[in-house]
Amino acid sequence: MLIDLNILIMQFITLFAGLSFRGDSWKQTLPALVIGMLGIFLVIGIIILATYALNKAFSKKKKDKDE
């Protein structure tokens, strides 16, 4: 069990050893992230509005029964 864990840790370290992280990369990626998130919220809003409109257009109105 311990040997398997050590092998897994070594593979993980070897996999990410070639990656370098730059501290200023967020300046380039943040605008793309914001635009993407706004796009997602916009599409979800359009789907909600379309669903609401279709429910209003095709729902049957209940008649009040006065007895």
Image: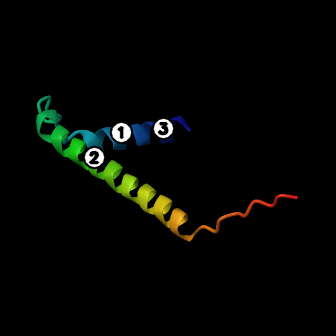
Residue type at mark 2 is Leu
Q: Which numbered tag is attached to residue 47?
A: none
**Residue in the image at 28% along x and 52% along y:** 39
Residue type at mark 3 is Leu
How far is the residue under mark 3 from the one under mark 2? 41 Å
**Residue in the image at 46% along x and 62% along y:** 53
Q: Of helix, strand and loop, which one carries label 2?
A: helix
Residue 12 locus on image (x, y percent): 35, 41
Q: Nearer the viewer, residue 17 or 51?
A: 51
Give left or right: position of 62 versus 33: right
Mark 1 residue crowding within 10 angstroms, few (<14) / some (14–19) / many (20+): few
Residue underneath mark 1: 10
Mark 2 residue crowding within 10 angstroms, few (<14) / some (14–19) / many (20+): few
Q: Is residue 62 above or below residue 27?
A: below
**Residue in the image at 43% along x and 62% along y:** 50
How far is the residue under mark 2 from the one under mark 1? 40 Å
Tag 1 or tag 2, which sits nearer the N-term? 1
Tag 2 or tag 3, which sits nearer the N-term? 3
Q: Which numbered tag is attached to residue 5?
A: 3
Give left or right: position of 6 versus 43: right
Q: Of helix, strand and loop, which one carries label 3?
A: helix
Residue type at mark 1 is Met
Residue 35 locus on image (x, y percent): 21, 46
Q: Are marks 2 and 1 in contact (CB under 8 Å)?
A: no
Q: Which numbered tag is attached to residue 38?
A: 2
| Residue sticking out furthest to the front | 67
Residue 31 locus on image (x, y percent): 16, 41
| Residue sticking out furthest to the top | 23
Query: Quadrant where the N terminus lies?
Result: top right
> To which quarter of the image does residue 6 belong?
top left
Tag 3 or tag 1, which sits nearer the N-term? 3
